[in-house]
Amino acid sequence: MKHVFISALFLSALLTACSKSVEELKDLKELRDLELAAQRGDAEAQYRWGEHCLLVSDIDDTKGIAWLMRAAEQGHGMARFSLGVIYEYGFHGTVVDPIEAAMWYKKAAESYQQLAEQGDMTAQFRLAALYKSGKGVPQDAAKADEWNKKAAEQLRVSAEEGDVKSQFRLAGRYEEGKGVPQDIDEAIEWYKKAAAQGDEDARYRLRILQNQRKHMNERRE
């Protein structure tokens, strides 16, 4: 049986602006196209195909790790981070290797740092998460907050332009107080905007926050 890929525990912080996930690749032609792109040397395709191999029960885990390695050697940040997770916890038939894990976390941080300094919002959020956790870089709450704020500024611009995914993600940032001051009222407003555009996740979070607010008001009365 396949292990649940523990990187999901970290991706809630790191994957704030990810491309289409491997789990969504259900069409056989789409999967074949992804494999071909990986074979042609596309780093993003190599990463996504590698994760697909690790998640599918009838594919040898060593193949998935090999594809992650190929992507990581080209500087792909998430491939490097995923390898760090694999070696830290000994997943997918590997032996726990803290030194190997630390090396890949450091390389992931280097990839994110370069992109973050170029203004890449996704890399900024991911780098912030690494500084918060101390993986690949010295733990530094101030730097984590700094990069979260820079990314949140870009996210707000996109949300104000009407991008529904950005609206949902910005609402989550206000709900949790990541990169912005925690503000449930602001979170509700952005969830409403995303929900108005048909985002079901936004509708779900909106109902939860509104119910929480209702119960709080009832207790005060």
Image (cartoon, helix red, strand yellow):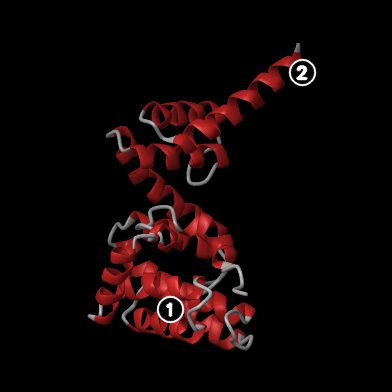
**Residue 107 — which label?**
1
- Residue 216 image offset from top left, x and y in percent: 71, 22
**Residue 219 — which label?**
2
Question: In the picture provided, is 68 more to the left or to the right than 205?
Answer: left
The residue at 57%/81% (across/down) is: 92
Q: On the rendered image, what quadrant is the N terminus found in?
A: bottom right
Q: Secondary structure at mark 2?
A: helix
The residue at 59%/24% (across/down) is: 210
**Residue 10 — which label?**
none
Name the amino acid, label 2.
Arg
Q: On the rendered image, what quadrant is the C terminus found in?
A: top right
Question: In the picture provided, is 58 more to the left or to the right than 110?
Answer: right
Q: Is residue 218 visible?
A: yes
Q: Quadrant of residue 21?
A: bottom left
Q: Residue furthest top?
A: 221
Quick one: label 2, few (<14), some, or many (20+) residues within 10 Å? Answer: few
Sequence order check, earlier mark of 2 and 1: 1
Question: Label 2 vs label 1: CA separation?
Answer: 50 Å
Q: Residue furthest left?
A: 40
Name the amino acid, label 1.
Lys
Can you say whether 63 is above or below 213 in the image?
Answer: below
Can you say whether 78 is above or below 212 in the image?
Answer: below
Q: Secondary structure at mark 1?
A: helix
Can you say whether 82 is above or below 152 in the image?
Answer: below
The residue at 46%/35% (across/down) is: 200
